[in-house]
Image: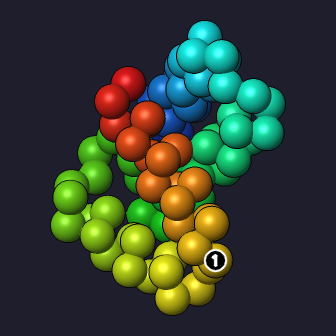
Amino acid sequence: MNIHEQQRFDLLYEQHLTNLTLQGKRPATIDAYSRAIRRIAAYFDCCPDTLTTDDLKRYFADLIASHSWSTVKLDRNGGRLSVRG
């Protein structure tokens, strides 16, 4: 990510953490969902809010091949919350 995109990611990431806290999520859930967002951002080297459905399909296909089903579900749920705001 370039500097501008990293700054945007950092702002959105902080908003994501705040939203999860306001939703009453437990600390372990916040940690897992936040890890999912970081993992998605690292995979694409961009801010996740710019990803398309096809991008996410590719990501999850690769994730299924390399991680546990539990991780896949956490990333799906964490990413879904991120996309909705």
The residue lying at 29 percent from left, 70 percent from top is 57
Q: Quadrant of residue 82?
A: top left
For the residue marked with disc 1, what is the amino acid?
Ser
Q: Quadrant of residue 49?
A: top left
Up the image or down, 17 lies above or below 29; here it is above
Quadrant in which the C terminus appears: top left
Which residue is identified by label 1?
Answer: 68
Residue 7 visible within the image: no
Q: In the figure, 46 relative to 61: above or below? A: above
Give how far across and how far down residue 8 sits, in percent. Answer: 46, 30
Question: x, y (%) of residue 32?
Answer: 69, 47
Q: Is residue 46 visible?
A: yes
Determine whether the residue tagged by mark 1 lies in a helix, strand or loop. loop
Residue displayed at 49% across by 27% down: 12
Residue shown at the point (39%, 42%) measured from the top left: 80
Residue name at image x 60 percent, y 23 percent: 20
- Callout 1: 10 Å neighbours few (<14), some, many (20+)? few
- 35 or 41, which is in the foreground? 35
Residue 47, given in percent of the width and then of the height, sits at 42, 45
Number of residue marks: 1
